[in-house]
Amino acid sequence: MRFAEDKKTVNAIRCTDGFSFLNKLILSFYSEWSKFLNYNRY
């Protein structure tokens, strides 16, 4: 039982890591994209 709980926790942590990584990726992409758009506007 304890092992199953630990496994759940590990999976949750992995999910969180993946999500934050995805978040960073999206944010950096978004900022680059807005820079690109602003550059092309003028």
Image (cartoon, rainbow, N blue to C red):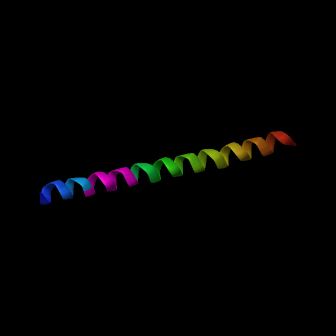
Quadrant into which the C terminus falls: top right
* Residue sitting at the far bottom: 2
Q: Position of residue 1 (x, y in %)?
A: 12, 57
Q: Position of residue 35 (x, y in %)?
A: 73, 47
Q: Is residue 14 left or right of residue 41?
A: left
Which sits in the foreground, 12 or 39?
12
At 81% across and 39% down in the image, what residue appears? 40
User: For the magenta stretch, what is the residue range?
Assistant: 9-16
At 39% across and 53% down in the image, what residue appears? 17
At 46% across and 53% down in the image, what residue appears? 20
Q: Position of residue 32 (x, y in %)?
A: 66, 46
Q: Compared with residue 39, is residue 7 higher up or lower down, i.e. above or below?
A: below
Which quadrant of the figure has residue 2? bottom left
Q: Compared with residue 38, is residue 10 higher up or lower down, i.e. above or below?
A: below
Q: Is residue 1 left or right of residue 21?
A: left
At 44% across and 50% down in the image, what residue appears? 19
Q: Is residue 15 left or right of residue 8?
A: right
Q: Is residue 2 left or right of residue 34?
A: left
Verify whether residue 13 appears in magenta: yes
